[in-house]
Image (cartoon, rainbow, N blue to C red):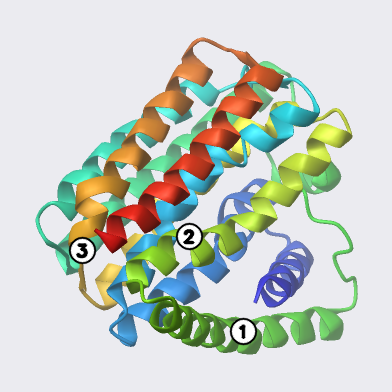
Amino acid sequence: MIFAGDLLVRGAVSIAKALGIPTLIIGLTIVAFGTSAPELFISLSAAFDGVSGVAIGNVVGSNIANVLLVMGVPALIAATPCDEKGAHRNALFMLVVSVIFAALCFLGTLNFYAGIGLLILLVIFLADSVRATRKHKKENGVSTTAEADDDDDEDELDVESVPENKLVATAYILFGLVGLPLGAQLTINGATELASSWGVSDAVIGLTVVALGTSLPELATTVMAAIRQHSAVAIGNVIGSNVFNLLAIMGITVTVIPIPVPEQILVYDIWVMLACAVLLYIFAAKRLCLGKVWGIFLSVAYIAYIYGVFALDFI
């Protein structure tokens, strides 16, 4: 599924570049949505199969893993600064969105109207990102035209090996569109089988196994960035991923089909997610540099969280 999502992104970026679409727009739409495609297809498949615990647990668990694991593990390798430009403003937006999402969850069911509200917030986030990026370029004397965007594609997009041939790019897109739903369905089947064989709820599997699996690309990216001494991008990646998980993934999913929120998530996991959002905001607001001590704390906190998930399910 991750492989299919990667091919979909590369193919779509290649076609978009060939059509002269500005790099900024490609990055904020195709790449952002494409890298979240696995989570989207999993949540949609789970919702249609009536496995609401996996549908919402996948998103809540991923947001928790992104903060505790994706920020923690790289800090064990190299110092991870949280002073990226715009991180404070975006972290505050992520915190507000997390609170709004939690409030919607306590209504009992995430429905069409909740989905529309989340998607409106997504449009606001994207519009603000475009405004901030264009302002930054203007302040630094860079043109905001499509031609200028195309000149520095490699600086704007973290996508390598984009195919030049349109037929190859089209094949990438087709494979991605076929592979993603197939992989998502296999994931849901595996998750429900695990839940049954382990004697736990589908929410537990969604919050742990599925959530960790869909967070692995972010974890791998930040670990490699830390090894290459580029760990400053970690907090931006985590904030962006968490915002898209809540607004795009859940927004699209519940607009298509309502999702009842499992009681366990309301009792424990939603509060852990909010605590992680507050912690990430503090990192950005204080412009902290996370060292090994923070790395150990965050990693141990994630292990404790996983233990708590299984312990509560067996009570």
Residue 208 drawn at (x, y percent): 48, 60
Q: Is residue 47 above or below residue 231?
A: below
Residue type indicated by callout 1 = Leu
Q: Which residue matches tag 1?
A: 177
Q: Residue at coordinates 27% horizontally, 46% vertically from top-left?
A: 268
Q: Which residue matches tag 2?
A: 208
Q: Secondary structure at mark 1?
A: helix
The residues bearing labels 1 and 2 have C-alpha atoms spaced at a distance of 26 Å
Task: Say which quadrant the N terminus sits in.
Answer: bottom right
* Circle 1 residues within 10 Å: few <14, some 14–19, many ≥20: some
Pair 2/3: label in front:
2
Q: Residue at coordinates 26% horizontally, 70% vertically from top-left?
A: 255
In the image: residue 12, left or right of residue 214: right
The quadrant holding residue 33 is bottom right
Residue 81 drawn at (x, y percent): 68, 19
Q: Residue furthest front?
A: 315
Label 1 vs 2, first from the N-terminus: 1
The total of numbered circles placed on residues is 3
Nearest the viewer among 251 and 14 is 251
Residue type indicated by callout 2 = Thr
**Mark carried by residue 261:** 3
The residues bearing labels 2 and 3 have C-alpha atoms spaced at a distance of 17 Å
Nearest the viewer among 129 and 282 is 282
Label 3 vs 1, first from the N-terminus: 1
